[in-house]
Image (cartoon, rainbow, N blue to C red):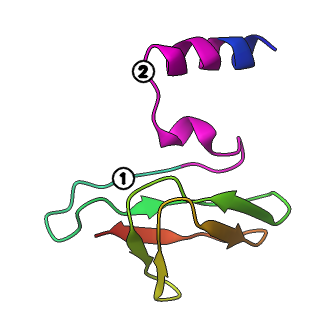
C-alpha cells in the first residue's frame, strides 16, 4: 500500500519513468555504449513466465530480431531475457 501511494505521488510530480511500471521481477539495465543508443536488458530470472507492456521507445529485440513499439506486449519465459536496442 505504501509503495502504491508513493508511486502515485511521484507520478503526479512527474518524477517517474517507464521503469516504475515494470513488474518487480523484471529489471532494466542500460549501457552507454557508443554503438548502441539505449539497449534494455530485461531479465526474467527465477520467476514464472510473464507478459509486460514495453514502455520505452521503439526498438529491436536483438535475440529474436523482433521490432517492438511503445506499449507492445513483450512475453518473457522463465529464465528468459530480452535485449532491446532503441531506434
Q: Is residue 53 left or right of residue 66?
A: right
Q: Is residue 65 left or right of residue 46?
A: left
Residue 14, x across and y down, in percent: 42, 21
Residue 80, x across and y down, in percent: 68, 71
Residue 31, x across and y down, in percent: 30, 55
Which picture quadrant has residue 52? bottom right
Among the two numbered marks 2 and 1 on one chain, the one whose residue lies closer to the N terminus: 2
The segment highlighted magenta reads 6-27
* Residue tagged 1: 30
Q: Residues within 10 Å of mark 1 (few under 14, many from 20)?
A: some
* Residue tagged 2: 15
Locate the N terminus and report the quarter of the image it occupies.
Answer: top right
Whether 61 is drawn above or below 20: the answer is: below
Whether 41 is drawn above or below 28: the answer is: below
In the drawing, what numbered circle is on residue 76? none
The residue depicted at 44 percent of the width and 55 percent of the height is 56
Task: Compare residues 80 and 76 and report the one nearer the observer.
Answer: 76
Q: Is residue 35 left or right of residue 29?
A: left
Q: What element carries label 2?
A: loop
Give yes or no for residue 47 being in the magenta stretch: no
The residue depicted at 45 percent of the width and 35 percent of the height is 17
Q: How far apart are marks 2 and 1 (CA)?
A: 19 Å
Which callout, 2 or 1, points to the residue nearer the camera?
Answer: 2
Which picture quadrant has residue 43? bottom right
Whether 25 is drawn above or below 12: the answer is: below
The residue depicted at 36 percent of the width and 63 percent of the height is 39
Judge whether residue 44 can be spotted in this image: no
The residue depicted at 62 percent of the width and 17 percent of the height is 8
Amino acid at each position: 500500500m505504501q509503495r502504491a501511494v508513493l508511486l502515485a505521488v511521484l507520478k503526479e510530480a512527474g518524477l517517474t519513468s517507464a521503469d516504475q511500471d515494470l513488474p518487480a521481477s523484471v529489471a532494466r539495465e542500460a549501457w552507454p555504449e557508443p554503438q548502441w543508443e539505449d539497449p534494455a536488458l530485461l531479465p526474467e530470472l527465477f520467476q514464472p513466465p510473464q507478459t509486460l507492456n514495453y514502455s520505452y521507445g521503439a526498438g529491436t529485440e536483438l535475440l529474436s530480431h523482433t521490432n517492438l513499439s511503445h506499449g507492445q506486449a513483450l512475453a518473457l519465459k522463465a529464465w528468459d531475457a530480452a535485449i532491446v536496442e532503441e531506434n
